Image (cartoon, rainbow, N blue to C red):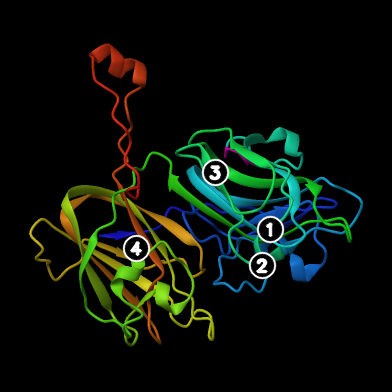
Amino acid sequence: MKITPRMIVVCLFAFSGFTLQSQSALAVIHGLNGAPTGASSIFNGTFDSPNAFDSPTNPNAARWASSFVANDDEFVFVDLGADVQLNEITIDWETANATDYTVRLRTEAEGVSLNPADWSVIATRTGASGLPGGGAQGDDDTFDFNSQSLTLQSAGGAGAVTAAEPVGRFLMINATSDATTCCDGYSIWEVKVDANPVNFEAIADPIVTFASSEFNASFTGDNLFDERIGGGDSDWAGVGPGPHFVDLDFGQTEAFGGFNYTQRNNVGIPGADNVVEIDLFFSDSGIFGAVPDVTITDVFQDLATHFYELDGAFSGRFVRFQVTGTQFNPGGAELDFFAANVPEPAPGLLALLGVPMLPRRRRHAA
């Protein structure tokens, strides 16, 4: 069976004093490289808004910087491609960090607005007085929307998560007070987002029982589930263009509705390791047939994480995930599976029926 990824195309907007970079994108879980972005201003073309969401390996060589003018109110935002449920956001500020800022969200139905006041505030940060290493690259502030908690690596002040598991498509960082003494303006190395497609429940990561090919001991199949993107030791890579596959054991029978997949990045030759075909095999016994149950040939070629919805009913305890490239050593940077999209009854109806509300599954155990 052949399927195609569910794709949303975002048009290019142009407004005075506003920049927007636009490409095709889908619901993003980890990587945002190539996702549409916008900013209230940029210092120059070297410090454009996509740099804040390019998901590279540290040390990060690119960042967004606003114009250095006497204006404390600046913002940068990203289009996640579709409404998603946010789990966690981490921000890595440069030395030109914000003392006070908010994290804001708008849904697909609401669309983009250039006025931060039109966005819903989902987290706040006030009184940040310094960054680890004086702006050296590394996580500064992490907002957890599942537990409504935050981790502040940056010094001083306080913060709050004001929304539990918010849903939206457009994510904004709105800086309102800068911490620099040399000049006005802000700069961000990286914004990392962890989210789930709406109405799709995350399935716990499987065990990799076998990999048909691994480039070397640093490029193992287990790296597909290590929560890291970028750098050789966080990717799975086979030897040659393939096909290569990993066999996965989920521990119990699961009904699969979709998956997130991120291409691996060949830093020396961008795109050289890209996958052009993905094949999926499902089994209850661990014995797979010769013909794949699902074949995807229009695989996204950027480095963002894309959600592929399975157009059909596929279940099993075991999955073979197979990739084929055209050259070099394809594999993948990150892989996550999601349960079939089954609408949940309204809580009021469940209460009427006397059914207890059960906690939703999380992608990873605490």
Magenta stretch, residue numbers: 104-108
Q: Residue at x 34, y 84 (%)?
A: 241
Residue denoted by label 1: 131
* Cα distance in 3D space between marks 2 and 4: 27 Å
Spot occupied by residue 248 in the image (x, y as percentages of width and height): 21, 63
| Dot 2 and dot 1 residues touching (CB under 8 Å) | yes
Image vertical order of residue 16 relative to residue 199, above or below: below
Residue denoted by label 2: 136
Comes first in the chain, label 4 or label 1: 1
| Depth check, front residue: 57 or 334 | 57
Q: Is residue 12 left or right of residue 33?
A: right
* Cα distance in 3D space between marks 4 and 1: 30 Å
Q: Is residue 53 magenta?
A: no
Q: Residue at x 77, y 53 (%)?
A: 14
What amino acid is at disc 2?
Ala
* Cα distance in 3D space between marks 2 and 1: 8 Å
Residue denoted by label 3: 150
* Cα distance in 3D space between marks 3 and 4: 24 Å
Between label 2 and label 4, give the one nearer the viewer: 2
Q: Secondary structure at mark 2?
A: loop
Q: Residue at x 45, y 39 (%)?
A: 146
